[in-house]
Image (cartoon, grey):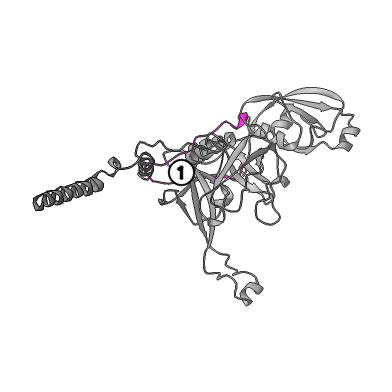
Amino acid sequence: MRRLWLIFAQVTTVALAVLFAVRMIAPQWLARPHEESRLMLQIPSARTPAPTAAPGSYSAAALKAMPAVVSVTTTRARSPRGGSPLERFFGGPDPSQPTVGLGSGVIVSPNGYVLTNNHVIEGAEEIEVKLADGREAAAKVVGRDPDTDLAVLKIGLPNLPTLAFGDDTKAHVGDVVLAIGYPFGVGQTVTQGIISALGRTQLGINTFENFIQTDAAINPGNSGGALVDVYGNLLGVNTAIFSRSGGSLGIGFAVPASTARNVLQQLIATGHVVRGWIGVEPQDVTLQMAQALNLPEAEGVIVTAVLRNGPADLAGIRPGDVVMDVAGQPVRNTGQLLNVVAALKPGSDTTLRVLRKGREQNLRVKVGTRPQLPAPANPSDDDQP
């Protein structure tokens, strides 16, 4: 009996030892089916595919564009007058300390060219660009174009992310867009909206206006940032907002990518932008003018003055002529006339269809080069095609 008890005790001890070892080394051998499933769910698998974007998500476009959108920080000297008497009395900003400005930019070339707004870097003594990956670099100004409020910077960093230009000519009202920038200095931010309007002109923001309007939230600090399509391509450069409070009210404006590309190429090549010019002073045709001139509708541009010996003068254009189209492109207002003439190649010949005393005439004009003038405080006061 004693011998049987010893054998039982030994067998039991060995069985418990084996069970303990199995429990420690391969617990799934002892798990019931539902317990095995629970154990497998707790262990991450390297073979699990990455989650795809949810329906209606624009994460792919955002992830493609975000690395190439940068923060632009500028340093400017304060006015030597030291502010107003009230500021000095109440301890306003120290006039000896420089001011710091915040904006955004878009890397459009692996060579380090960055598009931004002219007003972001105008008057800056130092410009610093910070990438989304944390790298920083001092930037130098390649060229500025106040007429479109665009500027090109250059930074010297390797392996730069870039953003490809989209085709804004194929954009439609209602298309979804994303605005990417660094508003209020809080960090890179993506907002979503639609294209609200195309070809916005006569806003008094720039000399040459052909804005994309969007309701994607654009706030201070977003200037110079990217407006991208749902494929993550650059559709425009965010430039201005309509706001009574300083924040977004759902009315923002971006310079189209086609304009930005043209300015970029010219600034890199020559440091300035060359535009066509004919030397006239234009004014929109009002309803009263249309009635007085027996025009079918209040559209077109009336010439109020002609520069002596300028291209228009030599072509026979006279004050009072109503310009109907230029180079076959209809002209309905001053903004369109400015843009159409500016796009003409200096030295080329073009045809203006004008209405003079109720009769249409086609006049051949040799396009001149638009003079390089300083940007006016209110561009709409000095616009001359």
Q: Residue furthest front?
A: 1
Q: In screen coordinates, is 195 left or right of 58?
A: right
Region of the chain picked out in magenta, as a range: 148-170
Q: Residues within 10 Å of mark 1 (few under 14, many from 20)?
A: some
Q: Which residue is mark 1?
A: 67
Question: Residue 382's image quarter?
Answer: top right
Q: Percent x, y for residue 272?
A: 54, 41
Residue 103 seen from this side: yes
Q: Residue at x 69, y 33 (%)?
A: 278
Residue 28 highlighted magenta (yes or no): no
Q: Quadrant of the C terminus?
A: top right
Q: Percent x, y for residue 145?
A: 58, 43
Q: Residue furthest bottom?
A: 89
Residue 169 highlighted magenta (yes or no): yes
Is 1 in front, or is 92? 1
Question: Residue 193's image quarter?
Answer: top right
